[in-house]
């Protein structure tokens, strides 16, 4: 006899571990290459939470895209960047900011750590962005098979990591 277990629907609540200090005050689609940002930990997080992170070349930063209005959230399919020449795909098949939980994730280069400040390169988060978590990038957590993606996504990302002129 198979017993069906109903999942418990827990209320999820997270608090920022830090905030981004960056040059950009508003989200932009491209030209994030070479930019440096600083993540300052909140007072609730001990400064030694960053201890040892400097020994990793990269960190994955999870953040809340706080400037996205709830009315702009997409829960279905759309054309990425509203470009009709790209196929309409579900919000979970793209990395757009108008996602249901507005969570962003970027792997960025660790530049330096100074007390409760983490300096990173190429974090595509704007000034004031709440940081939800910081994780070291380990090769063992990267894809173990070849990564594949559709042609439209390469076109979309063509200028994303270029330096801003």
Image (spheres, rainbow, N blue to C red):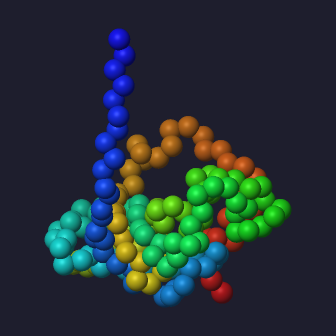
Residue drawn 49% across the image and 79% down it: 67
- Residue at (39% x, 55% y) in the render: 137
Q: Nearer the viewer, residue 15 or 73?
A: 73
Q: Position of residue 147 (x, y in %)?
A: 61, 44
Residue 109 seen anywhere in this rendered image of the structure: no
Q: Residue at x 26, y 76 (%)?
A: 41
Pinpoint residue 88: horizontal percent, then vertical percent: 74, 56
Instruction: Pick the quarter of the image with the C terminus.
Output: bottom right
Residue 34, above or below 9: below
Corner quadrant of residue 18: bottom left
Q: Quadrant of residue 42?
A: bottom left
Front position in the image: 36 or 74: 74
Q: Is residue 93 visible?
A: yes
Q: Is residue 2 above or below residue 113?
A: above
Using residue 74 as the reference point, say whether residue 59 is left or right of it.
Answer: left
Q: Nearer the viewer, residue 60 or 64?
A: 64
Q: Residue 17: x, y in percent?
A: 28, 70
Residue 1 horizontal side relative to residue 127, left or right: left
């Amino acid at each position: 006899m198979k017993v069906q277990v109903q999942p418990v629907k827990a209320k999820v609540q997270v608090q920022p571990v830090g905030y981004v200090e960056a040059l950009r005050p508003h989200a932009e689609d491209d030209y994030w290459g070479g930019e440096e940002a600083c993540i300052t930990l909140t007072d609730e997080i001990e400064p030694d939470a960053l201890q040892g992170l400097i020994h990793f070349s990269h960190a994955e930063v999870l953040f809340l895209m706080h400037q996205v209005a709830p009315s702009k959230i997409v829960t279905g399919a759309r054309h990425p960047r509203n470009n009709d020449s790209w196929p309409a795909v579900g919000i979970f098949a793209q990395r757009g900011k108008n996602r249901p939980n507005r969570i962003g994730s970027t792997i960025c280069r660790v530049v330096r750590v100074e007390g409760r400040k983490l300096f990173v390169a190429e974090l595509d988060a704007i000034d004031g962005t709440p940081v939800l978590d910081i994780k070291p990038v380990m090769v063992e957590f990267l894809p173990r098979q070849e990564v594949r993606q559709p042609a439209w996504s390469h076109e979309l990302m063509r200028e994303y990591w270029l330096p801003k002129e």
